Image (cartoon, helix red, strand yellow):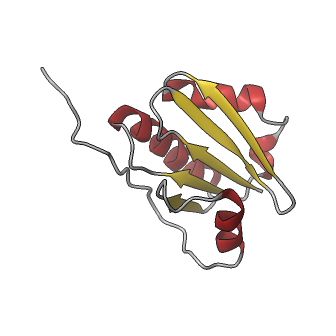
Amino acid sequence: MILYIDTHIRGKVNFGLLKSDKVECYQASGRTDILLSEMNKQLPQKWIDKIKAIAIINGPGPFSAIRGGVLVSNLLARSLNIPLYTFSVSEFNAQNSLFKIQNKEIKPVVYASPIYDAEPNITC
């Protein structure tokens, strides 16, 4: 089972489980700081013990939204010692991406890098 995370739309947090026979999709509204708590609320009990990899949509998207999703993905992959795969918004298709991961058509990354749709607007 593969956990996927998609935060490329401001104010929406999408995540789910890619299984060989089906895709389970979940959604929450709000900033990416709710991602872990929403995953704990909405995913089946003990989901964390069953995931074998993580697929993150790393952009392009808004700075804070992408940064939050990528941060959670990197954190989970490293702490659970499982592979991490990155997809752009245009590359990701749940069934096709699962197929590519299972057939080793793509390689895991050590670190998911964010792709922003614009320069960050950070002021003093």
Q: Residue at x 51, y 25 (%)?
A: 33
x and y percent of residue 120 in the render? 23, 36
Horizontal arrangement in the rendering, residue 74 relative to residue 5 (left or right): left
Q: Is 6 on the left-hand or right-hand side of 41?
A: left
**Does 39 sit above or below residue 21?**
above
> Where the C terminus falls, by quadrant?
top left
Residue 10 placement: quadrant: top left
Q: Quadrant of the N terminus?
A: bottom right
Residue at far left of view: 124
Q: Position of residue 103 (x, y in %)?
A: 70, 78
**Location of residue 2 in the rendering, given as x and y in whole percent from the top left corner:** 71, 56
The answer to whether residue 33 is left or right of residue 97 is: left
The residue depicted at 45 percent of the width and 51 percent of the height is: 58
Query: Which quadrant would residue 19 be assigned to in this image?
Result: bottom right
Q: Closer to the camera, 9 or 86? A: 9
Instruction: Name the image quarter holding residue 24.
Output: top right
**Residue at x-position 68% and y-position 50%:** 3
Which residue sits at x=51%, y=60%?
87
The correct choice, above or below, for 55 with respect to 119 in the image is below
Total marks placed: 0
